Image: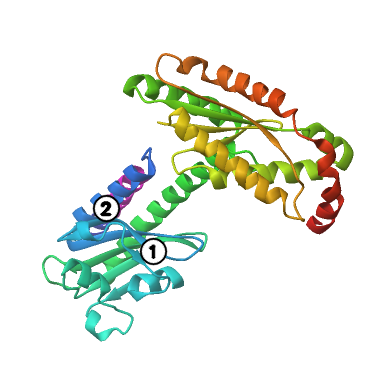
Amino acid sequence: MSDRDNDKNIDDLVKLSFFTDIGVAITSARTMREMLDRVMEKIGTIFVPLNWSLLLRNSKTGELTFKIAVGERADKLVGVKIPRGTGIVGWIAENGKSLIIEDVSKDERFIGNVDNITGFSTESIIGVPLKVNGKVFGVVELINKLNGECFSAYELKLLQTIADFAAVALEKFYYLKAIKKVASMDSLTEVFNRRSFDKILIKEIERCKRYNHPLAVLMIDIDYFKQVNDKYGHPAGDIVLKKTAELLTKNSRMTDSVYRYGGDEFVVLMPDTSVEDAEIVRERIKNDRDVINNQEDIIPVTYSMGLHSAGPDGVDDILSYSDIDLYRQKDIRGNGNFENMNAHVEEFLDEEE
């Protein structure tokens, strides 16, 4: 074997080791943020651009958002959104293809909106899509080489390789997030499930004790739910459960969280909430339920709602006291009137079908 062949083999091994190091660094990240930071670190080291950014794509709207931006005045870019198909990064995301543009002033796809935000002057761009199985997750964009030279075809290929590693890792994190969400949600009502409630309640109780903030729990029980199922079937019961979840979510605050506690029971967890403020939420739910019950295409239902708010001293028993208040409400109200439901149920089920 000649010296030239040996040199080529050594060069190939160096390149293979180089790509292996990049792949391991990116795919071994434990969190999405760690992975993205590693991608940007590798890009900065290898390409030495003046500015470089990573934008993530909204799968529903196609909108791109600057997730990470590095370089001169790049801090102004984080969080900035690019409408679908707009500009060079929009073209890359829509077409799933890489681009090298030596002079952006000669490319009709370039828009100066981002330069207007940063006060930076873009001259040349290299950009690649983050893509797996034809699906574009985002775009990596490099602007202006520090030495003033143009980006090369080799650099484009190298950047695409890094982006391919990143896209695989990104897809992994999306799938893990989706699996975690499925595990924490009630599939029928699309609110959090009992397992999630048990975990979050422990954390909120600890936070209540640590910061001396009140915690409120509102327990909701659907009156005569068993009779709805027995007389009209489980499809009617499912409809009532879904409508209840929608009602609670609609009337809860941004800081509150709604859970299906089990069967026909729901819970609204309200951090940093006094009994007076929690009572406002309960009253809002009651009033909205009354409005909904007056609509002809809705199965009229009633709820028993138990409420309790506590500080650090009594927060450990907050569920028990909420449950006590719930049954107190049932006694006061006589647990609703099942016969009042009958008038609209058949008509409602027909319309749902």
Q: Secondary structure at mark 2?
A: helix
- The kind of residue on which mark 2 rests is Met
Separation of marks 1 and 2 at Cα, in angstroms: 17 Å
Q: Which residues are magenta?
A: 12-26
Mark 1 or mark 2: name the one nearer the start of the chain: 2
Mark 2, residue position: 40
Q: Position of residue 147 (x, y in %)?
A: 11, 67
Residue found 12% across the figure and 71% down from its top: 148
Res 96 visible? no
Dominant secondary structure of the magenta stretch?
A: helix
Mark 1, residue position: 64
Q: Classify the position of the C terminus by image quarter.
A: bottom right
Of the pair 116 and 62, the residue shown nearer to us? 116
Q: Is residue 37 magenta?
A: no
| Tally of numbered tags | 2
From the viewer's perspective, is residue 81 above or below residue 251?
Answer: below
Crowd around label 2: few <14 · some 14–19 · many ≥20 (10 Å): some
Q: Residue furthest front?
A: 332
Res 303 visible? yes
